[in-house]
Structure formats: C-alpha cells, structure tokens
Amino acid sequence: MKRPVTILEAAVAQGQISACELLEQCLSNIERFDPQVRAWVMVDAAAARETARRLDEELAQGRCRGPLHGAPIGIKDIVDVAGWPTKAGSRLREDHRAERDAEIVARLRNAGAIILGKTVTTEFASFDPPPTRNPWNLDRTPGGSSSGSAAAVATGMCLAAIGTQTGGSITRPASFCGVAGCKPTWGRVSSSGIVPFSFHLDQAGPIARSVADLAIIVQAIAGYDPNDPVCLNAPLGDDLSLPLAQPPKVGVLEEYFFETASEEVRKVAWQAVERLRAAGVQIETVALPKSFAEAHRGQRIVMAVDAAAYHRDNFPSRRELYGPAISQVLDEGRAASVIDYSAALASQFRFRREMLAALEGFDALLTPAADRTAPGPETTGDPRFNSPWSYSGLPTVSIPCGLAEDKLPVALQFIGRSFGEAGLLAAAAWCERILQFTDVPPLFDEN
C-alpha cells in the first residue's frame, strides 16, 4: 500500500501527477478505509472529478493556480460549501443547505484545491463523541471536534483538511492522529460562513501531513474579509514554507504541561526535545505568567456564554435535540453572570499580553500537544493543553514527534506571537526536519 503523500510531494502543479490521478488515489483510500474510520459525512466524487478534469485542462493550457492546484481537500462540516448541507453534527440542521461557499472555501477553490467532501465534526464542534475512529487504533478516539478532518488526512483520504478550534479542536485531533495542525492567530482567517461556537475564540485552520503543507493552506485562506467583523487586515508574508536557516530558539513550558502530562507522553516529548537540542536548537525553560492560573476557567466561561447566546433560540426549549456534552456547556453559559463573563474577557487580554512578554527572545514556546495519547471513543480527550492558546488568540503549530509504548502518536505544540505565523511555521518546519516522523497508521499494512 502506497503511503499518503504531502501536497508538495504530489506536485500536481509541477506535472508529476495529474489532478485526476491524485483524486482517484484519495477516492480509493476512502473506499478502503472509511467504512472503518468513518471520517466523512459526505463525499461528492462526481463534482470532484469534474473539478480535477478542469484543473488538468488549465495546466495543459499553461495556467497554474499555485501549489494547491489539484489538491483534494476535506472541509469540516460546520463550514459552508455551496449546495451542500452544513449539518454541524446536529439533528437541528438536517434540512440545512448552504447557499454559498464560506470565505475560506472560496479562497481554497480560487487557489486550485479540489473540495472533496465534508468531514465529521462533533455536535456543534463541542465535546459529544463523534462516530469517527482513530486510524491508529479503532478503539480510540481521533479527538475532537475536527475528528474527521484529522482521521481523513492520516489515512490519505485527502491531502489536507480544514478544521476549527475553540479549545483544542485542531491541535488535539492532529496529535492523536499523527499529523500536523495549525491554529492561526485569532482574527487571521475569516469565520464567514462557519457555524460559530464562540465569537471570541473560534479560529479555522488546516490539518495536513507536513508543516510546509500547513503553510501553503494558511497562505491561501488567510487575509482580511470585510464580511467578518473580527477578521483583521494584517500582512501575512510571501513565503511561509521555508524552514529557518539557523536552529530556532525555543522556550519550553515545563511547568504544568510537562509536569501533568502522562508518563508516556512526557517521555516521548522529552526525547524529542533532547533530539532538537542535540541538533542545535537553543532550548531554555520558560515560566508561565501569573495570569495562566485564570486561563482555563476564563476560556470555559467565554466559550460557554458565547455558545449559549448563539443557541438561545433553540436551547433549552429544544433540549431533547442536543447531546449531553453540548447541553452542559450551554447550561453553564446560561448560568454564568455578566460579571464573570466580563472578568473572563478582561483576563483574556491580560493573559495574551503576558504570554507575548514570555515569548520575547524566542522563536516559539513548546509543550506536548496533548496530555496523553488518544483515549477511548467515549470521549474526545482533554483540551487543557490547547485551550489556553485559543483563549490567548496566539497561533500554534503541532507536529508528531514519536510513538508511545501503546503505539499511538505523541506530538509537540509550538506557540508563537500574534500574527507571527511566518516565524512560527518556519521554526516548526526546522524541528520537523530533525524529528522526521514517518510512521503511518497500521491500517495501511492491514490493507
């Protein structure tokens, strides 16, 4: 069985393979793996084939849209794709059909991507477990809420996928499934056409097989959108794909993150840190600011209140149509006081400012990407290693760094400055080149 390729390895734009051939490889993997993994809500093979044929014709005529030309991409099912339903994992949206593409989907199309289908999300991108299974072990969760996106990329059913993060919904699934993920700075990527969870926290971003592929997609989807009131006009830079010329300087957050990680995650993550140190990465221990003590509670309050505001027309009046986990979040949001919500928003600004101060002199900060390897399917895992960075709005990149004794992936999480994706991706790419994680899920050998 051929291993999945990255966008750069496929190189449709360079003529190494046609868009039609690459698409058929993905569709073949969907046929083989999705009955077990269940990563997709829907796949529109006919539309994808027509797009691939048209993109091959464009290449033959000398028109190339860039490195995403001909790359099959999955879209998390809280993101609108024109003519397709956006069910958001909810019975409340069974009859929904999108009238137009979300802004990020329109930008992906314009960059030459093939929109292959909708990937599974947990209900309203919350915490109720999805039907999707982890391709490394079908008895484990793929994480959430971007469950299908991570599982589909890990099995080569698409070359990359769009996820969203409010707590840890890009980083944790990417970590559990052994692929790379990027949560951009809050406000970097448009949320127009995306079902919201929290107005103050949500951010869309890519899941892919390499940091270079993450950079390609961030380059395509980032940028000002006048239809999104929180999407900011901040320059991104021309080239996000190149690693640093020199080893980066990285601050390790030992306190809390390494201290509370499971023994197997701590062991694999520290081994990766030592490999980076031996390769020349400058590594220093960095203390967490005092405001970190408020970060988890503050993130939960902001998330819950924002979610309750969005769902106020249906919850609690139609509680029977909501799962237990999302119901708990909405109950918390309805019960929170205005004073607590205001204090959480104030704490958010304070925490962001203090974390930016902690980043001074470093290319990135580093933690394990999750507190443990993927647990059972009754949960999506604990977002506590990720939610502070969603709360702060700072960008993160996660890369797999090894397998634990249970043969499940462990990943490192890099945290960067606000709107500093270029430097963060470059630092992560340098480290990725040293760590060289090449393992794939055992499903490839079984098939």
Image (cartoon, rainbow, N blue to C red):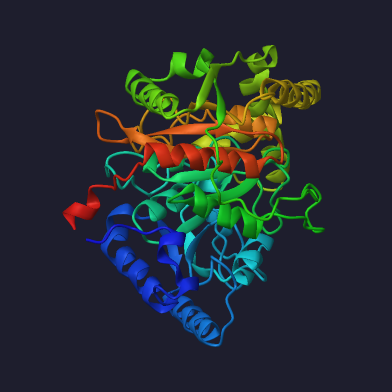
Q: Residue at x 54, y 17 (%)?
A: 284
Q: Nearer the viewer, residue 209 or 240?
A: 240
In-image side of 254 versus 307 (left or right): left
Q: Nearer the viewer, residue 332 or 37?
A: 37
Q: Nearer the viewer, residue 423 or 370?
A: 423
Q: Residue at x 53, y 24 (%)?
A: 282
Q: Quadrant of residue 29?
A: bottom left
Q: Quadrant of residue 107?
A: bottom right
Place of residue 262 in the rendered image (x, y in percent of width and height, measured from the top left): 37, 20
Number of marks in picture = 0
Q: Nearer the viewer, residue 442 or 284?
A: 284
Q: Indicate the quadrant containing the N terminus: top left, top right, bottom left or bottom right.
A: bottom left
When the figure is inspected, residue 84 is found, relative to residue 206, above or below; the finding is below
Place of residue 93 in the rendered image (x, y in percent of width and height, measured from the top left): 58, 58
Place of residue 396 in the rendered image (x, y in percent of width and height, measured from the top left): 58, 37
Residue 14 seen in the current view: yes
Q: Residue at x 77, y 57 (%)?
A: 225
Place of residue 129 in the rendered image (x, y in percent of width and height, measured from the top left): 43, 41
When the figure is inspected, residue 173 is found, relative to residue 385, above or below; the finding is below
In-image side of 374 versus 86 (left or right): left
When the figure is inspected, residue 62 is found, relative to residue 443, above or below; the finding is below
Residue 317 seen in the current view: no
Q: Indicate the quadrant containing the C terminus: top left, top right, bottom left or bottom right.
A: bottom left
In-image side of 118 versus 176 (left or right): right
